[in-house]
Image (cartoon, grey):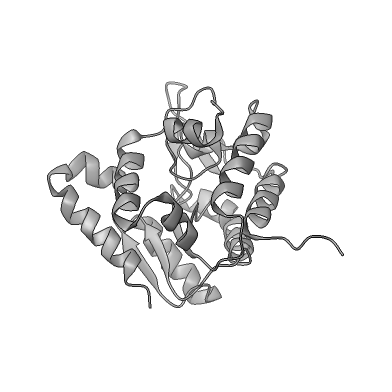
Amino acid sequence: MGKQENFSDKVLKFNGELSNFIINLPNYYRISNPYNSRNKAKIMEMTSVFYKKYYNDNNKRHMILGSSPARRGTAVTGIPFEDANHLYKITGIKIDDFYINKSSSNFLYQVMERYGGCEKFYKDFFMSFVCPLGIVKVNSKGNEINCNYYENKEIESSLYDFIVESIRKQISFGIDTSICYCIGSGENFKFLININKQYHFFDKIIPLEHPRFIMQYNSKDKDKYLSKYVDALKSRS
């Protein structure tokens, strides 16, 4: 009898399956997929080290869902909201072209620290995205810019089935579905609430303001938002 898959095995298998994902998007849009990028071998190695370090067990965890990976962040590394320097310290692997929004990752590290540290945080939570692959748009100047799955109805419709199936598969990793945390209290939360009414993925969804919104527009109130995050994460019941 083969070895039973644990949480990290299931995550890595899911990521490997994403390497084969192909979908046609409207003109001027494309999927940004780290698992079939030119850095694919490094990505697979780095994600393997990371998930085996923090998820090599069968613990039940709650999901924390952002909208979709940033073009120069998770869409490059494959590890949600992680900072380049932290990933290098953990895995010893550097990825080219990695420029995650440090204000977002730094805020979340402060959340983790207040919660009890990375080990405790990742033991209790699994971070991912409503749409687990990045989306980019080519603007009128020919430059690629970040895009979200809710950019317009055509994009949302193209990705809808993929999103639903991705959430369903990730729940099967060993997710406690009593509470899901949604990063982004606007359109991401609205979409997640709507599909949850149809598919009943979670008993309750708690919205949290996006770290970028906090750090760019409300940095003077950062401590208030840190407390809000930590209080929400600790009050699971």
Q: Which residue is drawn at 43% across and 43% down?
A: 81
Name the quarter where the C terminus is drawn. Answer: bottom left
Residue 117, image x, y percentages: 37, 51
Residue 51, image x, y percentages: 58, 48
Residue extending furthest left? 220
Foreground pick, 33 / 228: 228
Q: In which quarter of the image is residue 39?
A: top right
* Left or right side of 122 for 20: right
Q: Which residue is drawn at 40% across and 57% down?
A: 188
Foreground pick, 7 / 225: 7
Foreground pick, 162 / 237: 237
Residue extending furthest right? 1
Q: Is residue 171 visible?
A: yes
Q: Residue at x 35, y 51 (%)?
A: 112
Q: Quadrant of residue 183?
A: bottom left
* Left or right side of 228 for 220: left
Above or below, comparing residue 146 to residue 204 in the picture:
above
Above or below, comparing residue 177 to residue 102 in the picture:
below
Above or below, comparing residue 83 to residue 192 in the picture:
above
* Left or right side of 212 for 51: right
Q: Which residue is drawn at 17% across and 43% down?
A: 219
Residue 225, image x, y percentages: 21, 55
Q: Can residue 132 be seen in this view?
A: no
